[in-house]
Amino acid sequence: MHDACESIRTGLTHTNTLDAVEGVLVQPMVSDGVEVMVGMSRDPLCEPLIAFGLGEIHVEILGDVQFHVAPSTDRDATDMVRALKGYRLLTGYRGRPAVDLKAIEKVLLRMSQLVEAIPEISEIDLNPIFALPEDQGCRIVDARIRIGKILPTDAGEF
């Protein structure tokens, strides 16, 4: 890791752009696990809606996503995970280990708590999240949070 940082530093020094660097973020490379996604959107007419699904093509092509209105309980999180059509991908298959289901459920519960505590959040997208083998947790690889006022739909004014 140190060699890579030094190489970047040297290259920036040669191009006189080292001053533009504010720091270096070093993160572990995540290459194992099953990709899942968690999201939230607010509708002006109801409570925050939390989404959970398998990542990659499963969410985009197959639409294997579960929804639940926040706030969520432990049971709601468990039910969302187990209701996926592709749930077996999370329990181990073809020699692959089962993922840390408790960690996924914890992400769902924390999402619910976050959006209840901060109503200014209008949308969240955590995609992908790598669900790692049992007792290893999960890693959120990309996160997007949108802050803003929810406007009434064309259904009418409030």
Image (spheres, rainbow, N blue to C red):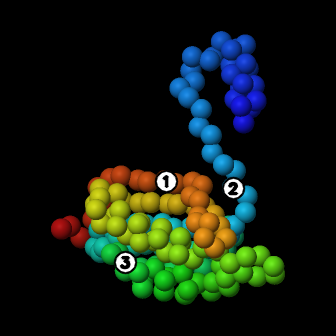
Badge 2 element? loop
The numbered mark, 2 or 1, whose residue comes first in the sequence reads 2
User: Quick check: marks 1 and 3 in contact, CB under 8 Å?
Assistant: no
- Above or below 91: residue 123: above
Image quadrant containing the N terminus: top right
Q: Could you tell me which residue is drawn at 28 percent across and 62 percent down?
A: 117
- Above or below 120: residue 153: below
Q: Could you tell me which residue is drawn at 29 percent across and 58 percent down?
A: 118
The numbered mark, 1 or 3, whose residue comes first in the sequence reads 3
| Residue farthest toward the right in the current orientation of the protein | 94
Apparent side of residue 25 relative to residue 111 in the rendered image (left or right): right
- Above or below 142: residue 9: above
Foreground: 114 or 144? Answer: 114
| Residue farthest toward the left in the current orientation of the protein | 158
Eye-nearest disc, 2 or 1: 2
User: Residue 31's quadrant in the figure?
Assistant: bottom right
At label 1, counting other C-alpha atoms closer than 10 Å, the crowd grade (few under 14, some 14-19, many 20 or more) is few
Foreground: 28 or 12? Answer: 28
**Can the viewer see residue 153 in this picture?**
no
Amino acid type, callout 1: Arg
Apparent side of residue 124 relative to residue 117 in the rendered image (left or right): right
Foreground: 125 or 63? Answer: 125
Q: Which mark is residue 72?
A: 3
- Circle 2 residue: 30
Expressed as whole percent of the image width and height from the top left, the position of residue 54 reads: 62, 73
**Can the viewer see residue 144 in this picture?**
yes
Expressed as whole percent of the image width and height from the top left, the position of residue 148 reads: 32, 53
| Residue farthest toward the front in the current orientation of the protein | 135
- Circle 1 residue: 144
The numbered mark, 2 or 3, whose residue comes first in the sequence reads 2
User: Residue 6's quadrant in the figure?
Assistant: top right
Amino acid type, callout 3: Ser
